[in-house]
Image: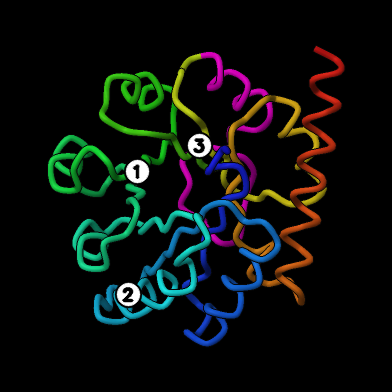
Amino acid sequence: MNPYRLYLVTDDQQDLTTLKQVVKQAVAGGVTMVQVREKHGDIRAFIERAQAVKALLKGTGVPLIINDRIDVALAVDADGVHLGQSDMPVTLARQLIGDHKILGLSIEDENQLIEANSLPIDYLGLSAIFPTASKTNTKKHWGIEGLKMALHHTALPIVAIGGINENNIPALCKTGVQGLAIVSAICHAQDPKAASAYLLSLMQHASEIGEETD
């Protein structure tokens, strides 16, 4: 089972009630990992949101990942942390969370990609694949060709993030990328369960076509 396959990143603009509804439905639809993101700097709110999501994920086998904050991840005993390039250094983060937690790192350029191969991390978040309204401060857009290049330069699993939707999922999956991170296409769907199931079906179909053409 590949935990990175359909990786839900929560929308920090949604209130707690909406967040819980989205996560519950998305997991029912087949989401394989959930990252709770909170950019407002309110640590109590972050912990509350993380605890609420953790309770929903209990018994599902879906890992809970915390964005940026090691302290929040430790406070709620999350399954892992995802760090950006300006967050705590991953070597220090690994010491704090231990060897058994999942540790991901955002990669924004080729130099970071190469450096990541010698870091104590479990997966890479390649950002941003395409332009996206939910993240405007991106260094570059990798595109399909950039993703292919990245896959050739690391043995670590790659989760593609940024502007991913039903239109580009087939092309992305044909690259053999290990995971796709989704925000808007699930969080803003009228029916997050149906949206998640549909995206998974697109991924499955594209992967099968990719295998046939290899």
Which quadrant of the structure image shows residue 38? bottom left
Which numbered disc flags the more N-terminal residue, 2 or 1?
A: 2
Q: Residues within 10 Å of mark 1 (few under 14, many from 20)?
A: some
Magenta residues, as a range?
129-152
Which numbered disc flags the more N-terminal residue, 3 or 2?
A: 2
Q: Residues within 10 Å of mark 3 (few under 14, many from 20)?
A: many
Q: Locate the C terminus by quadrant.
A: top right
- Residue marked by disc 1: 102
Q: Which is in the foreground here, disc 2 or disc 1?
A: 1
Q: Amino acid at mark 2?
A: Phe
Do the CB atoms of the residues marked 2 and 1 lie less than 8 Å apart?
Answer: no
Tell me residue 8's x, y (percent).
56, 57
- Residue marked by disc 3: 126
Q: Amino acid at mark 1?
A: Ile
Q: Residues within 10 Å of mark 2 (few under 14, many from 20)?
A: many
Which numbered disc flags the more N-terminal residue, 3 or 1?
A: 1
In the rendered structure, the answer to whether residue 3 lies left or right of residue 75 reads right
Q: Locate the N terminus by quadrant.
A: top right
Q: Taking 24 as reference, is 171 above or below it?
A: above
Reply yes or no: does residue 87 show up in magenta: no
Question: What residue is drawn where x is 47% and y is 84%?
Answer: 16
* Mark 2, secondary structure of its residue: helix
Reply yes or no: does residue 147 show up in magenta: yes
Which quadrant of the structure image shows residue 93? top left
- In this view of the protein, which residue sits in the foreground, 46 or 51? 51
* Mark 3, secondary structure of its residue: strand
Q: Amino acid at mark 3?
A: Leu
- In this view of the protein, which residue sits in the foreground, 61 or 94? 61
